[in-house]
Amino acid sequence: MPLNKGKHIVEEIDGVRCSLVEKGVSPERTEFLKKLLELNGYAVKVVQEGEPETFKIGVTDLLFNPVVDVYKRSLKSFSGKKVTPAYWLQESDNETEAEVNYWTFKE
């Protein structure tokens, strides 16, 4: 689910109701999200969706919403820093910007 859509979707994955994290994702992105979510204490369910090896990822915590948790910065990265939207979308590996909050920044 892209971070610009806040709709909370619940689907059944492997017979378990899950909050949908993303669908139609590549194996590399699936592995990244699976490890990141498990690091943060979520039970992750993954199922192959289509022929060109796309996957659907969900977590068993029905209250989890990726948009809320990423922007609330309640997820931790592999190095223990807060996950930013750029890090979640794998657009940036720079985790140092994750610690700067606009409401605590002073010049």
Image: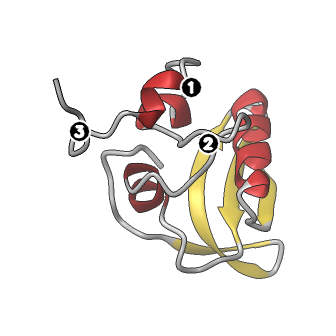
Residue kind at label 2, given as amino acid type:
Gly
Which of the pair 49/62 is nearer the observer?
62
- Residue at the spot x=46%, y=33% of the render? 98
- Residue at the spot x=74%, y=40% of the render? 30
Which of the pair 73/60 is nearer the observer?
73
Tag on residue 20? none
Task: Give coordinates of residue 58: x percent, y percent.
Answer: 67, 62
Q: Which residue is the site of mark 3? A: 102
Tell whether 12 sits left or right of 106.
Answer: right
Residue 23 can be seen in this image: yes
Which of the pair 52/74 is nearer the observer?
74
- Residue at the spot x=39%, y=57% of the render? 72
Tell whether 60 sits left or right of 70.
Answer: right
Task: Give coordinates of residue 86: x percent, y percent.
Answer: 45, 28
Q: Which residue is the site of mark 1? A: 90
Image quadrant for the C terminus?
top left
Gap between marks 3 and 1, in whole Å? 21 Å
Q: Label 1's element?
A: loop
